[in-house]
Image (spheres, grey):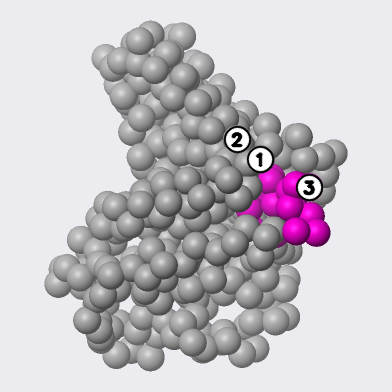
C-alpha cells in the first residue's frame, strides 16, 4: 500500500492532528488555559507537519494506488487549511522550475524591508497576492487542459470549506483558535521556508542555489525538508532518502556556508541581528523588481509534477 515505510511517521502525526482537533471541540473549554494553550500549540505543530507532508506528497505521492493518493490529498487539505493541489502552480511549477527569477511567484526579492525580521515574518503575506493569482490562472486553464486535476482541486476545496463552515457553526470561537489560526501558522511556516532556503543563494549554480539545514532534530520533525538543495535537483526523491543522497551528491560540491548545522542559530544571526547576507557573507543586493512573468506550462510537459493526478489517461499520446 505504502511506497515507503517511512511515511508511517507523517500518517501517525496526521492522525494525532485530527485526534487533537476532535478533543478540542469535544472536551476542552477555551477558558481553561492550562489545557487550551498546550493544545493550541500542539495543533499548530501538527498542522505545520501536515503542511510539510503536503509538500512531500505532491512531489512524491506516498501510496501505490492513485485513488488513495487522491483521498490523502483531501485529508492533508484539512490538516493545513489549503487545497493540496494548489501547491502545484506556485511551488512545483513556478518556484521549482524558475527559482528566484521573475517567473518564480515566490522569489525572495519581493521582500524588501530594511529590518530583515519583517521580511521573514511577513513573507507569506508579501507573496500571497502573486501565488493566489497564479493558483486561479492555472486552475482555470486546467479546467479544459487537465479535467481530472481540476476536479481533484474542486474536491479538496469543497471538503475544506464544508468542514470549515461546519466547525464555525458548531463553535466559532474554537474554530478560530483550534482550526483557523493553526492553519495560518502552518501556511506561514511552509511558505516562509522559501526565505530561509533561497535568500542570498545563487540560483544559477548547480549546487549553491539552495540553503540546507542539516540538524537532525529539525529534520526529524520536518521530514527532512532541511535538505532542500537535493530536493531541487531531484524533486521526486522520497524524503526519507534525502540525508544519505545529500551526503553523496551535494555535500562534496556545495559551498559550506549553505549547509547550516543549526536552524535556530541561523535564525538568530539572520533575523535577530538583522543581517541579510548572501552565502559568501556579502550584503544581499536587490535588483529592480519587475512584474511576474508568464510561466504556466502545458500539463503534458509536467506530468510528474501534478501530485495524485500526475498522469492523466486523457492526455496520453496527445
Residue position marked by numbered label 2 in the rendering:
151
**Magenta-span inclusion, residue 228:** no
Label 1 secondary element: helix
- Left or right of residue 210: residue 289: left
Query: Which comes sooner in the sequence, label 1 or label 3?
Result: 1
* Viewer-closest of 278 and 20: 278
Give the quarter of the figure containing the N terminus.
Answer: top right
Say above or below: 225 vs 197. Answer: above
Q: Is residue 39 visible?
A: yes
> What numbered label is drawn on residue 313?
3
Q: Residue furthest left?
A: 114
Say above or below: 26 vs 47. Answer: above
What residue is shown at x 36% (from left), y 20% (from top)? 175
For the residues labelled 2 and 3, the Cα–Cα distance comes to 14 Å
What residue is shown at x 50% (from left), y 55% (from top)? 89
Residue 266 position, x and y percent, is: 37, 70
Looking at the rendering, the stretch of residues picked out in magenta corresponds to 304-318
Residue position marked by numbered label 1 in the rendering:
148
Do the residues bearing badges 2 and 1 touch, measured as CB atoms within 8 Å?
Answer: yes
Give the quarter of the figure containing the C terminus.
Answer: bottom right
Amino acid at each position: 500500500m505504502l511506497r515507503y515505510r517511512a511515511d508511517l511517521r507523517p500518517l501517525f502525526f496526521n492522525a494525532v492532528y485530527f485526534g487533537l482537533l476532535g478533543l478540542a471541540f469535544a472536551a476542552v473549554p477555551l477558558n481553561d488555559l492550562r489545557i487550551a494553550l498546550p493544545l493550541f500549540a500542539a495543533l499548530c505543530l501538527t498542522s505545520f507537519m501536515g503542511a510539510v507532508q503536503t509538500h512531500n506528497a505532491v512531489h512524491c505521492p506516498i501510496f501505490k494506488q492513485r485513488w488513495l493518493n487522491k483521498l490523502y490529498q483531501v485529508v492533508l487539505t484539512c490538516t493545513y487549511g489549503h487545497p493540496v493541489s494548489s501547491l502545484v502552480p506556485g511551488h512545483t511549477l513556478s518556484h521549482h522550475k524558475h527559482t528566484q527569477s521573475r517567473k518564480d511567484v515566490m522569489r525572495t526579492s519581493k521582500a524588501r524591508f530594511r529590518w530583515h525580521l519583517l521580511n521573514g515574518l511577513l513573507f507569506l503575506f508579501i507573496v500571497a497576492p502573486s501565488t493566489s493569482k497564479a493558483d486561479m490562472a492555472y486552475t482555470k486553464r486546467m479546467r479544459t487542459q487537465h479535467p481530472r486535476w481540476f476536479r481533484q482541486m474542486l474536491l479538496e476545496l469543497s471538503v475544506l470549506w464544508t468542514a470549515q463552515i461546519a466547525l464555525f457553526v458548531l463553535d466559532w470561537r474554537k474554530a478560530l483558535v483550534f482550526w483557523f489560526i493553526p492553519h495560518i501558522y502552518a501556511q506561514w511556516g511552509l511558505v516562509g521556508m522559501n526565505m530561509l532556503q533561497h535568500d542570498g543563494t545563487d540560483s544559477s549554480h548547480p549546487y549553491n542555489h539552495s540553503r540546507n539545514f542539516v540538524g537532525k532534530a529539525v529534520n526529524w520533525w520536518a521530514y527532512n525538508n532541511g535538505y532542500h538543495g537535493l530536493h531541487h535537483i531531484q524533486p521526486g526523491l522520497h524524503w526519507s532518502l534525502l540525508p544519505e543522497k545529500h551526503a553523496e551528491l551535494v555535500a562534496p560540491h556545495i559551498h559550506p556556508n549553505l549547509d547550516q548545522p543549526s536552524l535556530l542559530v541561523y535564525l538568530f544571526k539572520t533575523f535577530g541581528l538583522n543581517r541579510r547576507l548572501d552565502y559568501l557573507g556579502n550584503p544581499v543586493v536587490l535588483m529592480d523588481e519587475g512584474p511576474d512573468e508568464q510561466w504556466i506550462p502545458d500539463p503534458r510537459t509536467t506530468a510528474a509534477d501534478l501530485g495524485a493526478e500526475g498522469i492523466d489517461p486523457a492526455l496520453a499520446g496527445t
